[in-house]
Image (tube, rainbow, N blue to C red):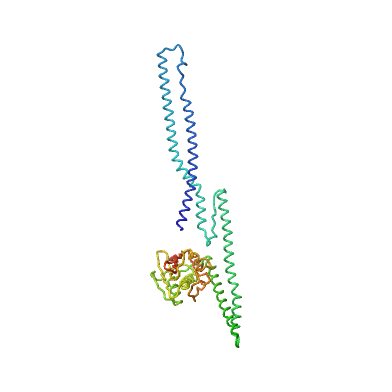
Amino acid sequence: MAGEGGSTRASRRRGVRWRFTQLYAGLFLTSGAAMLAVVALFAGGSMDVAPGPGSMAPDVSGAAQARIASLEHRLAQAQARQTEQLLLGSAVGLLVMGVLSLLLGWYAAGRVLQPLRAMTAATRRISADNLHERLAVDGPHDELHDLGDTIDELLARLEGSFAAQRRFVADASHELRTPLATMRTAVDVTLAKPGPLPEQTRVLAGRVHTELDQIDRLLDGLLTLARAQHDLPEPEAVPLDELAAAALASRGLRVEEVMDSTPGALVGGNRTLLRRLVENLVDNAVVHNESGGWVRVSLRTTGSAVELVVENGGSVLAQEQVAELTRPFRRAGADRTGSTGPGQALGLGLGLAIVAAVTEVHDGRLDLRAREGGGLRVAVTLPRAVEGAEAA
């Protein structure tokens, strides 16, 4: 899909450039044809310059008149040949210049569109993670400069909106923890009072405690999501294979492991966020599974990247449905086996949204595929740590 979008944009650029080229060449050919018509008009008028027989003096002898007539005929033929050669040469020159006008028009159109291409490339590089960048168009203060300034102002407004949204999510999640802790303490105190409690009160307190735990997991997921959407601190070399092994061990899962990477596959980034990414992927494989299902985890090192693939069995999913799973609060279905790990935000629809955010902030690539036999395949490709980080 990305390739198709890039080819479409390239064809559009060529289309605009080709239209400019046609315009330049058309104007040149029209002007050349008009000039050729004027040359032909004047050349045709200059052919009729020799006097006729009646214009000769009556006292001129017949031999002299014949001689003069012959010379006039030769002069007319020479003028005709000269005119034909002039018109033919002009036509050939117009044809040659027409071809050159296409080349020159193509070059001139490219020069005219060069600032627009630079602005387009700079705008395409700017995403939600680097909205602080600006086009900063230089050159004369013309229409293109005004367009660049307008885009820069739009980017500034977008940066402010994104920052305000992230601050709101982080602040709201943080502020809500205090009343939740107070409510949980009140429930615990109620249950710890001496003496018998009514069964209805005990059941209600248990339900409230369960709901409070779910809200706390939701807030924890929102905080992680908000943190992942901010710029990373100074990255460190994180062994992704150790994180995957720890996540599998903490779940007590029976999985098919394919760890064919080099020992200590290091990824440059934030250890806390990468651990959450791996835990969410493992929990997702358990949550969206079926009784007696299977989980397969593979870790491969390919050149300058490390690829972590987690597959699981389960019900058959549509690819359109899978594509929506990285959006917050989107779930694939109601059938789950349950989860007890730190990634329980999956049950709230935040698990893969956090995975997508962490992958993006680490300049990685996330690929979700519905398996033909049922279940899901999630592949995360992250850049390997640089040599300096590995040595550290």
Q: Nearer the viewer, residue 356 or 190?
A: 190
Indicate whether 342 appears above or below 121: below
Q: Where residue 163 sits in the image (x, y, percent)?
A: 57, 64
Residue ranking furthest to the bottom = 195
Image quadrant of residue 303?
bottom left
Q: Nearer the viewer, residue 287 or 280?
A: 287
Q: Is residue 64 left or right of residue 327?
A: left
Q: Is residue 86 left or right of residue 187?
A: left
Q: On the rendered image, what quadrant is the C terminus found in?
A: bottom left
Residue drawn where x is 42% and y is 29% of the image = 84
Q: Is residue 5 left or right of residue 190?
A: left
Number of callouts: 0
Indicate whether 214 appears above or below 114: below
Indicate whether 335 appears above or below 38: below
Q: Where residue 219 sits in the image (x, y, percent)?
A: 56, 72
Indicate whether 299 appears above or below 75: below
Q: Where residue 313 sits in the image (x, y, percent)?
A: 43, 71
Q: Where residue 98 sits in the image (x, y, percent)?
A: 45, 39
Residue drawn where x is 46% and y is 25% of the image = 47
Q: Nearer the viewer, residue 267 or 103?
A: 103
Image quadrant of residue 259?
bottom left
Residue drawn where x is 41% and y is 74% of the image = 255
